[in-house]
Image (tube, rainbow, N blue to C red):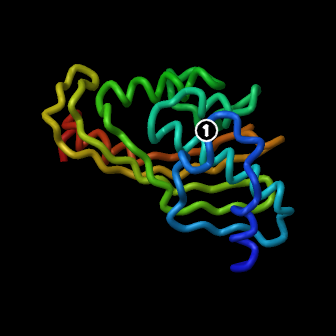
């Protein structure tokens, strides 16, 4: 497997539509199923990195490139629109509170048509959130996503965020 990983990232990224590979969030740890064909592994990882990079910088072109036309959020929070509009609105809502939010991929695991990301999101609460004005406090919480990839794009997403930590750090709820 160690010999396979460098090969996967040495392949050209001609399919990259949204951003060059060097501008995408790099995983700190990455585990690729060695039985995956290299082209599929590359496409799956690229879709996941594009979507993480959207959460990192808010660039909607990255979300549009990462998500399939029929994208389905399988753990849709109440009030969030299904499909592409959901994450676009969620990102804008969170960025209104934490404009400097950035995402790190702590772990990426790819096998078959699935990619699992463990993300760490950080920033400073300088905006407002549900009537609470930020005072610059640090925000640091985690999220885990499971993607089903079809034709190089995320078709389904199952996700969980540490919303309790996020809301406590914002001061929206108490300890």
Image coords of residue 155 (percent x, y) = 74, 37
Horizontal relation, residue 138 to residue 73: left or right: left
Does 31 sit above or below residue 154? below
Quarter residue 66 falls in: top right
| Residue at horizontal 19 percent and vertical 37 percent from the top | 171
Image coords of residue 87 (percent x, y) = 54, 29
Q: Nearer the viewer, residue 110 or 157?
A: 110
| Residue at horizontal 60 percent and vertical 66 percent from the top | 30
Q: Nearer the viewer, residue 161 or 8?
A: 8
Residue furthest out toward the bottom = 2
Horizontal relation, residue 139 to residue 59: left or right: left
Horizontal relation, residue 55 to residue 101: left or right: right
| Residue at horizontal 80 percent and vertical 59 percent from the top | 112
**How many C-alpha atoms fall within 10 Å of the one at disc 1: few (<14), some, or many (≥20)?**
some
Q: Which residue is mark 1?
A: 19
Image coords of residue 152 (percent x, y) = 78, 43
Quarter residue 74 falls in: top right
Badge 1 marks a residue whose secondary structure is: loop
Q: Quadrant of the N terminus?
A: bottom right
Tell me how many marks there are: 1
Does 145 sit above or below residue 111? above
Image coords of residue 83 (percent x, y) = 66, 25
Horizontal relation, residue 137 to residue 65: left or right: left
Quarter residue 167 falls in: top left
| Residue at horizontal 83 percent and vertical 41 percent from the top | 151
């Amino acid at each position: 497997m160690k010999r396979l990983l460098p090969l996967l990232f040495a392949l050209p990224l001609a399919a990259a539509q949204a951003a060059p590979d060097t501008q995408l969030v790099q995983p700190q740890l990455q585990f690729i199923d060695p039985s995956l064909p290299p082209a599929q592994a590359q496409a799956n990882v690229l879709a996941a990195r594009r979507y993480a990079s959207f959460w990192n910088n808010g660039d909607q072109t990255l979300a549009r490139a990462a998500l399939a036309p029929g994208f389905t959020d399988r753990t849709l929070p109440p009030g969030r629109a299904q499909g592409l509009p959901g994450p676009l609105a969620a990102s804008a809502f969170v960025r209104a509170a934490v404009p400097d939010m950035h995402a790190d991929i702590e772990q990426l695991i790819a096998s078959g048509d699935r990619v699992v990301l463990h993300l760490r999101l950080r920033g400073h609460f300088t905006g407002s959130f549900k009537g609470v004005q930020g005072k610059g406090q640090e925000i640091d919480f985690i999220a885990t996503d499971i993607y089903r990839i079809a034709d190089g794009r995320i078709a389904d997403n199952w996700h969980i965020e540490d919303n309790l930590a996020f809301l406590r750090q914002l001061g929206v709820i108490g300890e």
